Every structure is written in structure tokens, then in C-alpha cells.
Amino acid sequence: MKKQKSNLPESSVLYLVPTTIGNIDDMTNRAVEVLKKVDYIFAEDTRVTKVLLSHFNIITPLHSYHVFNEKMQTDKIIELLQQGKQIALVSDAGLPGISDPGYFATRRVLDSGFSVIALPGANAALTALVASGLPSNRFYFFGFLSHKKNLKKKELEKIADLEDTIIFYEAPHRLLETLELIHLVLGNREIVIARELTKKHEEYIRGKVKDIIAGIDELKGEIVIIVKGAEISQAQQLLNKKSISEHYQYYLDLGNESMKAIKQVAKDRGVAKNFIYKEIHKNI
Ligand code: SAM
């Protein structure tokens, strides 16, 4: 077990600093202060970050950090932390590590015994979710689906039974294909397309996926797709209200073998098979 107290470390810390997702006013005071005080900033695209830094008169030296050099640059970050330096990591937009570089460095820095402090800030997924009007109490962040149509379909099939709201990031030129696959695999669900969040042309399109496919022209800009989770049938709800052993018995009575019945009960209830197995065997 390792504990990290984050209050005011003076040195050897990696800060994960959110930038904006389009509106410069969403940059927090704390994010600006941290970018000013650290010794170095590692940025996904130094050209993008230079614009941001110059807006806030930040002159901290910049290094690049992107998916193609993250191993080498993480070594450099660790070296700097060993010298007692403070580092900030930023991506082009929103939170580093969310469909952006950041995880690799975070893991290595923690494994090397240094502190990682994340600042809260702009994020496209959560911004879209809370305004979507779809349930936000339980959700599943998928990020980008595969670019390949057959893999994308398989990825959707894997989450077809999920009852939680699902959040996807998508590029505008792949939107139509993705919506058609969502319709094919997940059915005619309620969805929300959140576009150009925090920017001048911000827009939410809410409705059934089939109507949206029919009603939209080519959309431009940055896009989040929020999809309502699977509806569970009334029969399923009744089964889930039974005790675990009654639920298990129901599948045995249908002629299933014990392990198959356990697997089905676990699937219905969204819990591990092991848990159902133990519950059933503790009553025997
Ligand atoms: N790290 C970012 C975050 O915290 O949200 C996400 C970066 S990911 C590379 C970029 C994707 O996020 C875009 O393709 C789009 O799906 C979504 N996105 C980013 N900014 C957005 C915005 N202003 N409006 C809608 N979606 C946005």
C-alpha cells in the first residue's frame, strides 16, 4: 500500500493540468498558476500549447509529450523529478489521460515513487453527459470506437446489454457510420449528439437514433455521442427482484445445468459469477 498526501508538495511532482475544450475562459486560475510555477511543461502539441501559454503570459519551458514519444519523454520526466523539479503535463484539450496521452507517464511516475496531482477542469465527456438529459448517475465512458467498421460493430456488440448511459467520442466524418451501427447493434435508442461544446456553435441534438440519422446533414466540429443504456424488460426486472437462489432455481427449472444457471444469474444481475456461486453454495 502507498499513501500520497497531496498538500503543497514543493518538489518532485507531476501535475496533470486540464486545458480548455474550446472556450479559453474555462481555464481555471489554479491551472494557470500551476503552469506558471512548474519548472517544465510537457505538452501533446507544443504549437497548440504555445498559443494558450502566450494568452496567459506563461513563459515556462515547453517539451513535447505525445503518443509517439511518450516512453522517451517519460524517462525525461522521471529524470527531472529525481532532480526535484516540478512538471506539468497538458494535452491539446481537456483532461490529459482521457482519450489523450497521460496514463503512461502517470503510471511510471507513481511506480518511481513520486507524486501525481490532477487538477479538475474541462472535459468533453462529462460536460456533454450532464446536459444530455440522459441518466447521469451511472455511465460508461467508451472514448473512441475503432476506426474499422467490423471492429466497431464488435465493440458495440460487447456493450449492447449495458444499462448505464454510454459516452463515445467521435470524429465528424465517421459520425454517420457510427450512428448507423449504433442503430443496428443497440437498437433505436435515445441518443444525444453534443457538438462544439463551450464554443460559438455549441449544439445538442437529442432524439431517437433513427430520427437523428434521417434528420442531420453532415455535421462539422468536435462531437460527443451519448447513448441511453439498454432497457431491461419487466420480466428481467422481476427476476432480479427474486432472491439469488430463486433466480438460480428459475434457470435450473428451464433445464439449464448448474454452471450455466449461475452464469446467467450473474449476467442478469451484473455481478461476478464467483459471487453468485458462493451465495448459492453458502445456502447448501
Ligand atoms: N482530453 C479530452 C477531454 O478531456 O475531453 C478529449 C480529447 S480527445 C483527443 C478529442 C475528442 O473529444 C474529440 O474528437 C471529441 O469527440 C471530444 N471533444 C473535445 N472537445 C470537444 C468539444 N468542444 N465539443 C464536443 N466534443 C469535444
Image: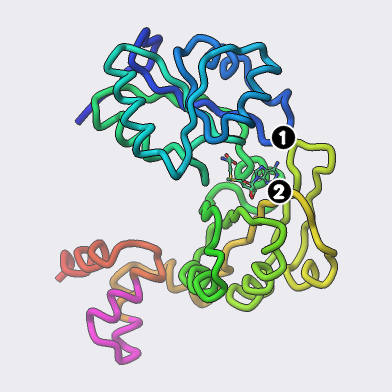
17 left or right, relative to 114:
right
Residue bearing mark 1: 22
Q: Which residue lies at the image location 41% right of the left edge and 70% below the top edge?
A: 268
Q: Is mark 2 within 8 Å of ligand 1?
A: yes
Residue 23 lies, in percent from the top left, at 74, 30
**Which image quadrant is residue 281 in?**
bottom left
146 left or right, relative to 254:
right
Q: Quadrant of the C terminus?
A: bottom left
The range drawn in magenta is 250-265
User: Hey, what amino acid is under mark 1?
Assistant: Gly
Residue 98 lies, in percent from the top left, at 51, 42
Q: Quadrant of the N terminus?
A: top left
Q: Secondary structure at mark 1?
A: loop
Residue bearing mark 2: 222
Residue 193 lies, in percent from the top left, at 73, 55
Q: Quadrant of ligand 1?
A: top right
Q: Secondary structure at mark 2?
A: loop
- Number of callouts: 2
Q: Which residue lies at the image location 52% right of the left edge and 30% below the top edge?
A: 43
Q: Is mark 1 within 8 Å of ligand 1?
A: yes
Asked whether the residues under the numbered discs 2 and 1 touch, taking CB atoms below 8 Å apart as contact, a structural biologist would say yes
User: Hey, what amino acid is under mark 2?
Assistant: Glu
Mark 2, Cα crowd under 10 Å, few <14 / some 14-19 / many 20+, is some
Q: Which residue lies at the image location 56% right of the left edge and 65% below the top edge?
A: 147
What type of secondary structure mainly makes up the magenta span? helix
User: Does the image show residue 95?
Assistant: no
**Residue 203 shown in magenta:** no
Q: State the residue in front, 135 or 194.
A: 194
